[in-house]
Image (tube, rainbow, N blue to C red):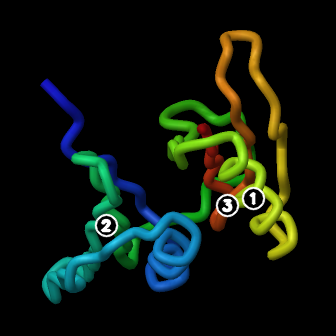
């Protein structure tokens, strides 16, 4: 068994899509739009990964992102391939105005990673 995809509701669908394309080389499909419900989605694929990310929005989506330690799914983690690539991407994201919460560092359980606050306060871990 494997994870097929994870879905996120977001307020700024196009902005989120651009973020994952720019920083993580996401490849989106064509937008799906259901005019009856207002649902709009993109599914992004990532190099060397079977898992995909579905970005979704609809008129009823509310902004509930104030507490980054809220209940439920809390972060996405991307493996970039090396410590140097973790360092480089973390530096780029910081220079582009994203807050770095931790790292880059080796965690107590042996992972080399950083964690940033991405758009819409989504936590994103960047691992080697």
Residue 98 makes an appearance in the image: yes
Mark 1 or 2: the one toward you:
1
Q: Is residue 17 left or right of residue 64?
A: left
Residue density around tag 3, few if under 14, some if 14–19, many if 20 or more, within 10 Å = some
Rendered image quadrant of residue 108: top right
**In the structure shown, which secondary structural element does the residue marked by tag 2 occupy?**
strand
Percent x, y for residue 127?
Answer: 61, 38
Per the model, the C-alpha gap separating discs 2 and 3 is: 16 Å
**In the structure shown, which secondary structural element does the residue marked by tag 3 occupy?**
loop
Q: Nearer the viewer, residue 13 or 46?
A: 46
Dot 1 or dot 2: first in sequence order is 2
- The residue depicted at 86 percent of the width and 72 percent of the height is 95
Percent x, y for residue 51?
Answer: 27, 46
- The residue depicted at 35 percent of the width and 75 percent of the height is 58
Q: Is residue 19 left or right of residue 110?
A: left
Q: Which residue, given by chain and number where applicable, does mark 2 sit on? A: 44
Dot 2 or dot 3: first in sequence order is 2
Query: Taking 52 as reference, is 43 above or below it?
Result: below
Mark 1 or 3: the one toward you:
1
Residue density around tag 1, few if under 14, some if 14–19, many if 20 or more, within 10 Å = few
Q: Which residue, given by chain and number where applicable, does mark 1 sit on? A: 88
Query: Taking 97 as reference, is 69 above or below it?
Result: above
Query: Which image quarter is the C terminus in?
Result: top right
**In the structure shown, which secondary structural element does the residue marked by tag 1 occupy?**
helix
Q: Which residue, given by chain and number where applicable, does mark 3 sit on? A: 118
Asked if the residue under mark 2 is in contact with the one under mark 1, i.e. CB atoms within 8 Å, the reply is no
Q: Nearer the viewer, residue 61 or 44?
A: 44
Mark 2 or 3: the one toward you:
2
Rendered image quadrant of residue 1: top left
């Amino acid at each position: 068994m494997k994870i097929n995809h994870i879905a996120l509701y977001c307020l700024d669908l196009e902005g989120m899509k651009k973020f994952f394309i720019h920083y993580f080389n996401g490849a989106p499909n064509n937008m799906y739009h259901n005019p009856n419900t207002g649902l709009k989605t993109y599914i992004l694929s990532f190099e060397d990964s079977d898992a995909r990310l579905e970005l979704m929005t609809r008129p009823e989506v509310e902004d509930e992102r104030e507490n980054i330690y809220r209940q439920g799914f809390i972060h996405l983690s991307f493996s970039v391939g090396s410590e140097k690539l973790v360092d480089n991407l973390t530096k780029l994201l910081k220079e582009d105005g994203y807050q770095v919460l931790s790292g880059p560092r080796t965690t107590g359980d042996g992972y080399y990673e950083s964690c940033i606050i991405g758009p819409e306060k989504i936590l994103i871990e960047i691992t080697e």
